[in-house]
Image (cartoon, coloured by chain):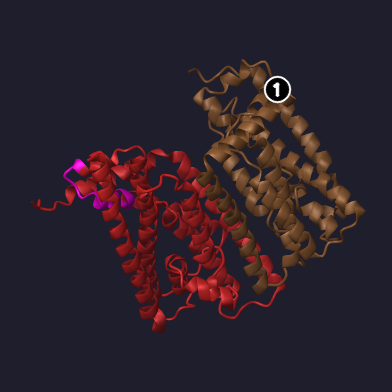
Chain colours: A brown, B red
Amino acid sequence: MFGLYRQYWRINVLTTLEYRANFILWSLFTVVYHGSAIAALYIVLHEFPSMNGWTFRDMAFLYALWMLAHALQNTLFSNVDDVPERIREGDFDRVLIRPVDPLFSVIATPGQIFPDELILAASFFALATVYSGVRVDAAFVLLVPLVVAGGALIDLGINLGIATLAFWFVRVDALRWVVLQLEQEFTRYPIVIYSRGVRFLLTFVIPFAFMNYFPAAYFLDKHDGTFLLPPQVGLLSPLIGTALVLAAYAFWRFGLRRYQGVGH
Amino acid sequence: MRRRFRLEPYVEFAKRAIAREATYRFNVFTGLGSLVVRVYLLRTVWTALYAHNAAPRELPLHAIVTYSTVALLMGLVLDIDQTRALYDRLHDGSIATDFMKPINVPLYFFADGTGEVLFHGALLVPALGFALLLVHVDVPSLGVLAAFAVSFLLGYFVGFFLNFILNCSAFWTLEISAVQMIVTWLTDLLGGQLVPLVFFPAALAGVVYALPFAAMFSTPLLIYVGVIGPERYFDVMASQLAWIVVLGTVSTLLWRAGARRVVVQGG
């Protein structure tokens, strides 16, 4: 399986090199996508210096933490998002007849995947860490990779859960789309600003707040007192991520056993 | 040889575009859903910001919420790529047969785009209805509303020609999806849809007011909330018109060069 995975990355890199102009343009879009979000935050917080006690420096770190976890998920597991479409097209049945685990087969479907977003995210994270003035010590260096991996797992767990619904419902795009919006736009701000219901949703139902808000609050030493939780809950991200992925994987296996194809 | 111009075929093209858009019910649903979510988000964000900081004098909280809501509603129309059909037909090569038809091809794309826009324009009504459940939107005087409508229309044409230029570049390169996404994202930020341009730091503001994107969103919106008063209507609309002339000229030149290319290649 390791050999297969290495081949998968080899094909990805070769494909990327083949379509160089296209790759450069899409990388540029990635820069514009994150750049415009960060610029909008900068402009707003230049005019209004504080959002419930969070400054632009804090929010740059908040964004960087989400960006890094999300980019890690995108780089390693973005193929999971294609499952609903592959089921609809009947192409999914191909992964079922291969002598490897179907989920592995899905994840290792070659395309034009390159870790450009991850490199960008890591660079911005380094910048934002220095800029935010967060204390960088041994604990920080040890905890950040864990928290980022946890964030990526949370992202994966939710994506896999939604993709699995496609075994029963042919069209899950609308749901995926709304959840993606919740993730990308609502994680930009400290969740204290939201109403109770939205905070509850982002903490306990689809726990995007554990991708960046709670860990960032811990590292930046913010005491917002969201749901009376101490800042240390931010360090639970790896546990929550692991639990979520395990649950999503069990759900996936359950769906897979019942899957009968869409009738092509 | 010149044929007498008839409008009916183009009305028919527009009608067919409306029927086509109406079949994508899923897009309509996500479009409205996303708008409601965004209205909630912007209301919350601005409320939080105004609660903890000194409010700027020219845009009190109710004005900024109005601004952002109207901006999102305008996006339903302005974010449409009306001349996508041009790209599609260049991509699959069917543009060649379009040139053989007894029609004015650019006008065909304009009619198709207009149909698409009219359909999405009709969605403004339910969208506004949903938005009003979440926020209060200020309604200015009739005179201001009229000026806003004119400026919005001018902004629409600025956007139309920008899209047309992008789609025309598909005559030379077929890889334009990424560029279009880049331009869409830049339009939303630099056009003042996400954050009013009056909040931009002075150095940046100088740049954004010199770009065509401000003519799409910012000008009509600032008229709506009254930051641009009646004494400046003439100036700002003249500048919108200037952009239409510039971009329209570029569009015409690109179209001619591209059409010649198709004729030469497909001969």
- Residue at screen point 10% across, 51% down: B3
One can see residue B90 in this view: yes
- Residue extending furthest toward the bottom: B231
- Residue at screen point 51% across, 46% down: A21
- Position of residue B202 measured from the top left corner of the image (x, y, whole percent): 58, 78
Label 1 sits on residue? A253
Which of A112 and A71 lies nearest the eye of the viewer? A112
Is residue B104 inside the magenta stretch? yes
- Position of residue B162 measured from the top left corner of the image (x, y, whole percent): 39, 59
- Residue at screen point 84% across, 39% down: A239
- Residue at screen point 61% across, 48% down: A181
Q: Is residue A154 above or below residue B230?
A: above
Give the amino acid type for the residue marked by disc 1 in the picture.
Answer: Arg
Which of B103 and B74 lies nearest the eye of the viewer? B103
Q: Which residues are magenta?
A: B100-114
Question: Magenta segment, principal secondary structure?
Answer: helix
Is residue A51 inside the magenta stretch? no
- Position of residue B257 measured from the top left corner of the image (x, y, whole percent): 28, 54
